[in-house]
Image (spheres, rainbow, N blue to C red):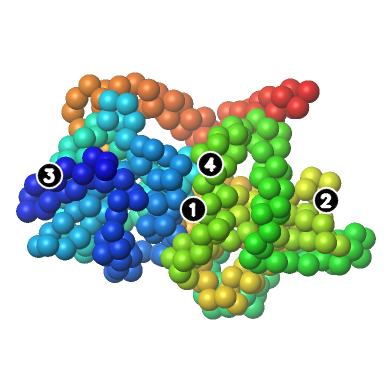
């Protein structure tokens, strides 16, 4: 068994366990609390994502908060050296936070103490997380596509706000079909070979742009493959593929709940770049998602021209850390905060950000040689 000592705290009993030690009663309670939260049903906040991370990250834990003999909250996290904690799956998780019974209040430092944490780092804290949001250092837009009124209504909105973008993308789709072969789209592709192709494209894109290759990390590689096989109402892996003459030219892997598709890993074959296959793919994803009852596609934080063209609005997410006084918190600050502040300084100055972007691409080209 994992670390499962009970801690009494302000009328609550807190039990810390490994994700696979949660029983069915607790998992059902987690889902019920999430439904009552009123937040978008982001699949990263469902128990299946935490369970999947637990299988590839040995330091994954969940604090279960009990009140009056019933589960009243869940706080998933990973614990590092000296109690430096982080959001579950930090680095790939696009929505983070605790799941608490409405009206339940808890002091962050007390929760961290009960979990033997000196700090808890987050980079995609969802809005409405009143326990941790006061500790946020920055907030970001997370662009979304609202297809709740159907795809036709979304396309009509695009014609109004981005007429040139929509007209050009649809024209490229027709040209792709004429010049390269029949265009076919599969919203939920189960072929693991197509997933491998997407991961190869994405790794090459990371290297080409000078970014850290996430798929070079075995735990991320394994996590994505396992989630591709996960099929539950609250969290299922969805691989969408755009084919031309039965050849994949663009693909995306994300997670979906009944009503939200959280966009995660998009990539395309650079040989077809002139046709903008990634944009075509996203339009077909929006169309299929709307037909399947999904009302929201969350494109994830971070500026991007394609997101600006596709989005209908934004959610807010937050970055920062909750800490409690001590050596561990001081070490966290020394290891993380100067780097984060440097990133913020560059990001808020467009000219510097442009230099940084060009430098990353140059590094990527050098790596290619």
Residue to which mark 1 is pinned: 142
Residue 162's image quarter?
Answer: bottom right
Q: Give the tally of numbered discs.
A: 4
Report the Cα–Cα distance between label 2 and label 3.
57 Å
Q: Are marks 2 and 3 in contact (CB under 8 Å)?
A: no
Q: Which residue lies under the disc numbered 2?
A: 272
Pointers 1 and 2 in contact (C-beta within 8 Å): no
Residue denoted by label 4: 220
Q: Which residue is mark 3?
A: 7
129 relative to 342 in the view: left or right: left
Neighbour class for label 2 at 10 Å: few (<14), some, many (≥20)?
A: some
Where residue 237 sits in the image (x, y, percent)?
A: 55, 59
Q: Earlier in the sequence, mark 1 or mark 3?
A: 3
Q: Which type of secondary structure does the marked residue at label 1 adopt?
A: strand
At 36% across and 64% down in the image, what residue appears?
A: 39
Q: Residue furthest right?
A: 179
Where residue 64 appears, as percent x and y from the top left, is 22, 52
Q: Dot 4: few (<14), some (14–19), or many (≥20) neighbours within 10 Å?
A: some
Q: Is residue 368 above or below residue 237?
A: above
What residue is at 45 percent from the left and 69 percent from the top? 233
Indicate left or right for 312 with 138 as reference.
right
Distance Cα–Cα, label 1 vs label 2: 28 Å
Residue 350, located in which quarter of the rendered image?
top right
The answer to whether residue 105 is left or right of residue 43 is: left
- Residue 301 coordinates in the image, percent (x, y): 50, 48
- Residue 36 visible somewhere in the drawing: yes
């Amino acid at each position: 068994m994992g670390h499962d000592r009970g801690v009494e705290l302000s009328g609550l009993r807190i039990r810390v366990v490994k994700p696979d030690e949660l029983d069915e009663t607790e998992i059902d309670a987690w889902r019920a609390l999430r439904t009552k939260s009123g937040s978008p049903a982001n699949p990263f906040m469902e128990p299946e994502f935490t369970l999947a991370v637990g299988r590839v990250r040995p330091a994954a834990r969940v604090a279960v908060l009990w009140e009056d003999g019933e589960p009243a909250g869940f706080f998933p996290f990973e614990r590092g050296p000296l109690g430096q904690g982080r959001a579950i799956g930090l680095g790939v998780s696009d929505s983070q936070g605790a799941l608490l019974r409405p009206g339940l209040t808890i002091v962050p430092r007390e929760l961290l103490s009960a979990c033997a944490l000196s700090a808890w780092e987050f980079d995609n804290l969802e809005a409405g997380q009143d326990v941790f949001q006061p500790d946020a250092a920055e907030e970001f837009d997370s662009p979304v596509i609202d297809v709740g009124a159907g795809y036709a209504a979304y396309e009509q909105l695009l014609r109004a706000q981005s007429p040139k973008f929509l007209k050009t993308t649809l024209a490229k789709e027709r040209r792709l079909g004429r010049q390269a072969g029949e265009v076919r789209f599969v919203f939920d592709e189960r072929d693991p070979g197509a997933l491998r192709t997407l991961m190869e494209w994405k790794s090459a894109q990371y290297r080409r742009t000078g970014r850290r290759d996430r798929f070079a990390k075995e735990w991320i590689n394994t996590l994505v493959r396992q989630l591709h096989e996960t099929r539950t109402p609250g969290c299922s892996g969805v691989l969408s593929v755009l084919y031309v003459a039965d050849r994949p030219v663009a693909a995306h892997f994300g997670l979906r709940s009944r009503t939200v598709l959280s966009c995660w890993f998009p990539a395309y074959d650079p040989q077809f770049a002139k046709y903008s296959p990634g944009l075509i793919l996203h339009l077909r994803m929006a169309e299929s998602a709307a037909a399947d009852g999904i009302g929201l596609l969350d494109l994830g934080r971070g500026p991007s021209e394609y997101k600006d063209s596709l989005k209908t609005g934004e959610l807010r997410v937050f970055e920062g850390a909750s800490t409690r006084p001590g050596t561990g918190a001081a070490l966290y600050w020394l290891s993380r905060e100067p780097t984060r502040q440097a990133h913020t300084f560059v990001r808020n100055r467009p000219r510097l950000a442009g230099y940084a972007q060009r430098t990353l691409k140059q590094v990527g080209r050098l790596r290619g040689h």
